[in-house]
Amino acid sequence: MSVSPEHFTQATEIAQRLQAEIGRAVVGQSDAVRATLASLIAGGHVLLEGMPGLGKTLLVKALAKTFAGQFARIQFTPDLMPADVVGHAVFDLKNQTFAVRKGPIFTHLLLADEINRAPAKTQSALLEVMQERQVTIEGESHPLEAPYMVLATQNPIEQEGTYPLPEAQLDRFLVKVMMDYPSADEELALARLTTQNRVGDGLDVAAVNTVIKPETVVTLQQVAAHVRVDEQVLDYTVRIVRATRDWPGIGIGAGPRGGIALVRLARAWALLEGRDFVTPDDIKHCALPVLRHRVAITPEAELEGLDADRLLRGLLEQLPAPRA
């Protein structure tokens, strides 16, 4: 695909309109909205983590409403089986043959709600589709239609009845987005919006307009893939990832996939900013959501009250960035 300056301009306008539409339903959470939208443009998957009631599911539903594609939601529970997710083969008595009954995983946008409530066997049912965009049922591969994105949510405080995601699955997520409490003004606006002439306490996505088709998302992804990354910026990205492997407080650093993911997200981030090139600041902005779930901190750092975000911020502050 040949990408002209006009393509970049149009892509930025569409991406910014998508962001504005999501903002009609989601109050605040601007960083989470932007990281999630950038992940869609980068062709990656998102793990959303936050306390109950912060709008994780609402964000996903608002994103799904912006484009006229298929959307499916799976409520992960301890008794959910892999066949409930991917589908299974059933015997047709009339035709005396087996037919494939496809599961909810066959969609464009998949919301895996409270993914850590399902056991590892069911969680692993997503591994193939997240990496290869296909599902194997009874030895037969079924490719999924582009675009395809998994958005999983999890609650960080509940431990009973949950199954932590294995590192192999965490690595399949392009980003881990942390949703924090809103500011005082945002919480006031949220309370006003939720209680004014409304029954119940839920926010809906009725105000969000559908603005693009699935094929437009694919075009956005192709344009983002042509955003320029200077050799110095690429070297800076690799230095960040390699530094996580021997940084004090980090026991296990990010692998090469972390650097690749960082470049992918930074390209989409730059497109949202209206640029056709990636800057070192783009890499810095994207580093935490891309790397926080790809590193493991040492027990000593945990005892000191440190977490992955604080350690990564310290790394980014001390590692010199290239100058223009």
Image (tube, grey):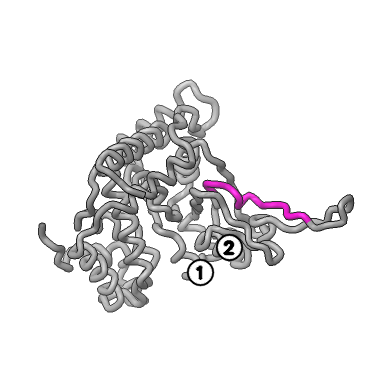
Q: Quadrant of residue 238?
A: bottom left
Residue 291 place in picture, x, y as percent? 34, 64
Kindly indicate the quadrant of the structure image that contains residue 5: top left
The residue lying at 53 percent from left, 46 percent from top is 108
Q: CA distance from mark 1 to mark 2?
A: 9 Å
Residue in the picture at 53% in, 40% down: 69
Instruction: Using the image as rendered, state which of residue 82 and residue 201 is in the foreground.
Output: 82
Residue topped by disc 1 = 166
User: What amino acid is at disc 1?
Assistant: Pro
**Whether residue 75 is situated above or below residue 132 in the rendered picture:** above
Magenta stretch in the rendered image:
99-110
Q: Tell which of 130 and 221 is nearer to you.
A: 221
The kind of secondary structure element at disc 1 is loop
Q: Position of residue 219 (x, y in %)?
A: 40, 44
Within 10 Å of the Cα at label 1, are there few (<14), some (14-19), or many (20+) other Cα atoms? few
Mark sitting on residue 123: 2
Report whether 24 appears left or right of 266. right
Taking depth in this image into account, of 100 and 170 the one nearest to the observer is: 100
> Which residue appears at 27% of the width and 74% of the height?
242
* Quarter that holds the C terminus: bottom left
> Label 2 amino acid?
Gln
Question: Going by the image, does 241 lie left or right of 158?
Answer: left
Which residue is the extreme one toward the front?
2
Q: Secondary structure at mark 2?
A: helix
The answer to whether mark 1 and mark 2 are in CB contact below 8 A is yes
